[in-house]
Image: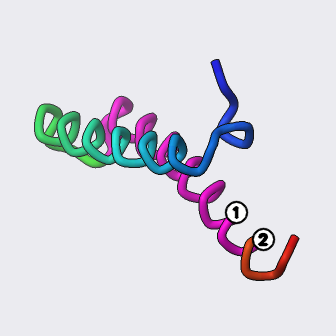
Amino acid sequence: MVRRYEMRNEDLLQKIDTLQFQLNEIFKQKGSLTDCAVVKVSQELDDYVVEHQRRMRDEVSGK
């Protein structure tokens, strides 16, 4: 399994899209934002979004 910080930008964005879709689907099934499955996917999505933001920040600052 490739760690998020080792992923190419295109793959990272694809993973974010996939997790967003999964999050929406799980929420539709569970009907609650506090359901364990919803929270788990949401937290994973957060990690990938933060990684993407870090990369964008580093790109702008020239790192």
Residue at position x 32%, y 47% from top? 20
Q: State yes or no: discs 2 and 1 in contact (Cβ < 8 Å).
A: yes
Quadrant holding the C terminus: bottom right
Give above or below for 53 relative to 23. Answer: below
Q: Which residue is mark 1?
A: 55
Q: Is residue 53 magenta?
A: yes
Q: Is residue 16 left or right of residue 61?
A: left
Q: Which residue is mark 2?
A: 58
Numbered disc 2: secondary structure = helix
Residue at position x 65%, y 54% from top? 51
Give above or below for 23 relative to 51. Answer: above
Extreme residue toward the top, this view: 1
Quadrant holding the N terminus: top right
Give above or below for 47 relative to 40. Answer: below
The stretch of residues the image draws in magenta is 34-58
In the image, 9 versus 34, the foreground residue is: 9
